[in-house]
């Protein structure tokens, strides 16, 4: 019992029960070691309460202590399993985030997301001695990977960022690194814009044709663009990642699905267009959403389009995220007539065992292999292997990013079934696609 007590006193804050500064520094040190081994970013968040001194002075230390206990509890409720919180002293708390992934930008976005959750949780009214109290935190954030900075240096960075958050008017989150700050600001702006875009109907679809070996257009891929009024068109690479992180990809993806189904229904009335399939890019979050199958059925029924002309392009990482669920969803959709193509094939896990287990129709060879196919013997070998593998599993093969006649010829000589790329057509608005077909 005495031993337990000693440990508690040495490493834990007696008021809140959170780890103290000493234990935190130790954990931070471990986290830095882990971040090297696992090639993952972590983040250190330093936060304090914006009006703690006033509360302490006007309502007494007892009430101040209760507030600190309540804040500690809310921190605990907000954090993920792999994160930890500590109290440094006074109203200063530290949160250590681990396993934020290997990409710096996406790690910054995740850290910002968690910081925002913490900010919101602490800002909710807290009942103290049956009085409601409102408090807000300011939060400074710094990212780390490895030991390039000492634990002290990281704390100083977070402290500087915290100071900037206070300077920005409190109740704010700031990053130590100006580039990270610019990144999260930019993403926040895009997210706000996307919400408006959905309400104001600012999305458009372009279509890029897919041709068979004789050059006939057999299908077209729907590619999303964002056209804010009076501004240039924004390409999907700029906003799809934000839409995915924020969950907005679910309603946006549904809009794409409905638009493509409407397009299919109108094409069915044209003799030359009615044999054309349309393919749609599906994001992981959309595909694994519990309503996905119902949304697909709804879009088909409402438009009167036939599922037989619809192709879904899925990525390998989407499928591997929840493999069993993915197979189930695919089978259900396959039964109503939808076809499946693996997008960007070759750059992910390219696990051969799953190809056999999935109800696939087509593999799409990633652009990066097609690009150097004429000069690079490795890429030639990979493309040849993909084509013969796919054929032996009974799958069609399409190559994307075909820009030159020489690329097309190499692919054709190796029995590639279909082609897509600037050599045939850029993505174009739907009227232009219809002209191309006619
Ligand atoms: P992706 O599915 O790999 O789409 C093909 C991209 O390659 C398109 O870029 C297309 O314009 C471009 N491309 C086509 N032919 C060529 C070529 O010959 N050379 C080169 N260098 N590029 C070519 P885009 O339209 O900017 O789309 C980028 C990505 O955005 C897509 O990559 C897809 O992952 C995503 N995306 C687009 N629309 C949607 C959508 O409706 N939903 C979802 N979830 N993602 C979408
Ligand atoms: Ca695609
Ligand atoms: Ca692709």
Image (tube, rainbow, N blue to C red):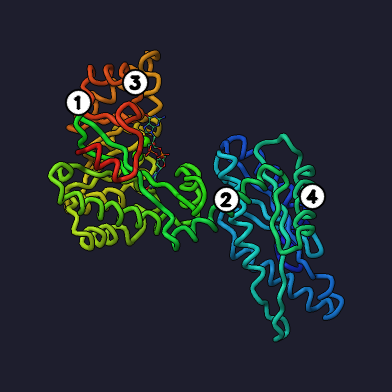
Q: Is residue 46 left or right of residue 394?
A: right
Mark 4 CB near ligand 1 (8 Å cut): no
Disc number for residue 112: none
- Of circles 3 and 4, which is in front? 3
Q: Which of marks 1 and 2 is nearer the N terminus?
A: 2
Q: Is residue 275 visible?
A: yes
Assign a secondary structure to mark 1: loop
Q: Earlier in the sequence, mark 1 or mark 4?
A: 4
Q: In this view, does 341 lie to the left or right of 155?
A: left
Residues under numbered marks 1 and 4 in contact, where contact means CB atoms less than 8 Å apart = no
Residue with the mark numbered 1: 213
Which x, y percent locates residue 407? 32, 19
Residues under numbered marks 1 and 2 in contact, where contact means CB atoms less than 8 Å apart = no
Residue with the mark numbered 3: 404
Q: Earlier in the sequence, mark 3 or mark 1?
A: 1
Mark 3 CB near ligand 1 (8 Å cut): no
Which x, y percent locates residue 218? 20, 36
Tag 2: Cα neighbours inside 10 Å, few (<14), some, or many (≥20)?
many
Which x, y percent locates residue 369? 38, 24
Disc number for residue 160: 4
Q: Can residue 321 be seen in this view?
A: no
């Amino acid at each position: 019992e005495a031993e337990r007590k000693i440990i508690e006193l040495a490493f834990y804050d007696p008021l809140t029960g959170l780890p103290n500064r000493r234990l935190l520094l130790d954990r931070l040190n471990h986290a830095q070691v882990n971040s090297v081994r696992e090639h993952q970013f972590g983040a250190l968040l330093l936060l304090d309460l914006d009006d703690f001194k006033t509360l302490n002075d006007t309502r007494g230390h007892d009430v101040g202590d209760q507030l600190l206990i309540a804040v500690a509890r809310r921190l605990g409720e907000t954090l993920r399993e792999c994160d930890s919180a500590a109290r440094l002293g006074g109203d200063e708390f530290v949160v250590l985030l681990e396993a934020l992934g290997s990409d710096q930008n996406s790690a910054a976005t995740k850290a910002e997301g968690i910081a925002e959750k913490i900010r919101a949780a602490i800002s909710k009214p807290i009942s103290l001695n049956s009085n409601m109290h409102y408090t807000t935190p300011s939060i400074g954030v710094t990212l780390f990977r490895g030991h390039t900075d000492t634990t002290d240096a990281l704390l100083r960075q977070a402290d500087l960022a915290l100071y900037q958050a206070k300077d920005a008017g409190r109740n704010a989150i700031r990053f130590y690194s100006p580039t990270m700050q610019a990144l999260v600001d930019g993403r926040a702006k895009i997210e706000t814009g996307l919400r408006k875009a959905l309400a104001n109907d600012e999305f458009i679809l372009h279509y890029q044709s897919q041709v068979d070996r004789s050059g006939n257009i057999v299908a077209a891929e729907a590619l999303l663009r964002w056209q804010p009024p009076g501004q240039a068109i924004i390409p999907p690479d700029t906003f799809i990642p934000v839409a995915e992180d924020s969950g907005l990809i679910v309603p946006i993806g549904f809009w794409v699905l409905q638009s493509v189904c409407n397009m299919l229904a109108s094409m069915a009335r044209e003799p030359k267009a009615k044999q054309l399939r349309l393919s749609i890019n599906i994001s992981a979050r959309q595909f694994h959403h519990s309503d996905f199958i119902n949304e697909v059925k709804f879009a088909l029924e409402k438009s009167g389009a036939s599922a037989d002309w619809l192709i879904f392009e899925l990525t390998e990482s989407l499928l591997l995220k929840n493999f069993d669920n993915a197979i189930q969803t695919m089978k259900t959709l396959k039964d109503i007539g939808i076809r499946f193509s693996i997008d960007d094939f070759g750059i992910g896990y390219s696990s051969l065992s799953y190809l056999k287990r999935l109800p696939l129709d087509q593999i799409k060879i990633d652009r990066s292999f097609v690009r150097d196919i004429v000069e690079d013997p490795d890429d030639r070998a990979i493309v040849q292997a993909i084509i013969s593998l796919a054929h032996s599993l009974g799958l069609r093969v399409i190559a994307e990013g075909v820009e030159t006649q020489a690329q097309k010829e190499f692919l054709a000589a190796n029995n590639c079934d279909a082609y897509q790329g600037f050599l045939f057509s850029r993505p174009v608005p739907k009227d232009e696609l219809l002209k191309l077909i006619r």
